[in-house]
Amino acid sequence: MAKFADIIGQEQIKEHLQNALKTNKVSHAYILNGEKNSGKEFIAKIFASALQCEKTGISLGMAEPCGECHSCIQMAGKNQPDVIYVTHEKPGSIGVEDIRSQINGDVAIKPYSSPRKVYIINEGEKMTVQAQNALLKTLEEPPEYTVILILTTNMESLLPTILSRCVALNMKPVRDSQVKKFLMETMRIPDYKADICVAFARGNVGKAKMLASSEEFDNVKEEAVTLLKYINEMEISEIVAAIKKINEYKLDVNDYFDILAIWYRDVLLFKATNDANHLIFREEIQYIRRVADRSTYEGIETVINALEKSKQRLKANVNFDLTMELLLLTIKENS
């Protein structure tokens, strides 16, 4: 069973929650704010486990779930009756009825077998204004045994009245060295692959873990690198065919842009230093060297700017094929 010691990074959040447990000064509501896959739910479940633990929980002033008592075993099996995961039928929103039926209508019922009732609202940014106003009624006068954990990727989507009644905890990017250590030691990922996943994850352990175990990511990376290696010799028809293939990927297109950006970051770094030791794609050094030799600093900067423009165009719903064609032609002209 996971414990606070298993959380990678996030030292401030760990310290705050463990101090609350040790001193028995737990707030009735917390917001965990951080990007997707950053580990918010992992932390929320560990905190909930510690709150409900029968051996080393809050009543004994300890700050780790024991992993052995009846409550901890129930938590591991996802059937602890006093830890409620708020669900919603509509994928895009958490509606007022979801909050009324699962929190407001339930909160007055005392815990079944634990000292607390813990409500975990994942994707809190999806709560409608009406849903948030309904939640506010509980937040204003919560029963003393209630703890509400709101997990969100966008704290600004929450009403000021909600924010003022919660303790806000912000997830921080985890150091690259910690993410790499986790991938290599826990997931047995080889050094060179760990470096690539770390570069893409940007301090997000969950994303690094997902990329490391994604066969599709490996395939997309290989195809993107092949395209970059040979784009200088490609005909327009071949570039158009490549664009069609990119559109078929299930991976977030921003991940594809990141592959291109990291390649050109390597080109720029090698051109400036002539040192391959710090490159992410160092196994492709002969091609990195070739592109660095034939590209100017201005040309590389043009490509990097074009990548950012392409991201903005797709956000603004500009045609995908047109956006990618402009980008790949800019790469071809400046490589």
Image (cartoon, rainbow, N blue to C red):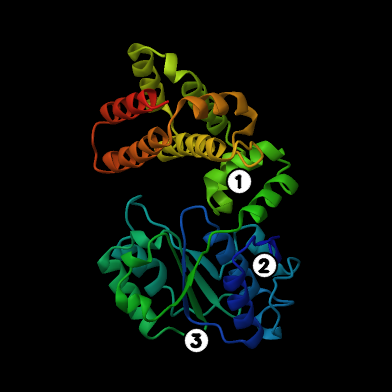
Q: Residues within 10 Å of mark 1 (few under 14, many from 20)?
A: many
- The residues tagged by marks 3 and 1 sit, at their Cα atoms, a distance apart of 38 Å
> Which mark lies nearer to you, 3 or 2?
2
Occupied quadrant, residue 241: top left
Q: Earlier in the sequence, mark 2 or mark 1?
A: 2
> Which mark lies nearer to you, 2 or 1?
1
Residue drawn at x 50%, y 77% is: 147
Residue 144: image tag: 3
Residue 87 position, x and y percent, is: 42, 58
Secondary structure at numbered mark 3: loop
Residue 295: image tag: none
Residue drawn at x 55%, y 58% is: 39
Residue 253 position, x and y percent, is: 40, 36
Q: Quick one: 67 or 283, which is closer to the camera? A: 283
- The residues tagged by marks 2 and 1 sit, at their Cα atoms, a distance apart of 18 Å
Identity, as a three-letter code, of the amino acid under mark 1: Lys
Residue 212 position, x and y percent, is: 61, 40
- The residues tagged by marks 3 and 2 sit, at their Cα atoms, a distance apart of 24 Å
Please name the residue that numbered disc 2 is placed on.
4
Q: Quick one: 216 or 203, which is closer to the camera? A: 203
Please name the residue that numbered disc 1 is placed on.
209
Q: Earlier in the sequence, mark 3 or mark 2?
A: 2
Q: Earlier in the sequence, mark 3 or mark 1?
A: 3
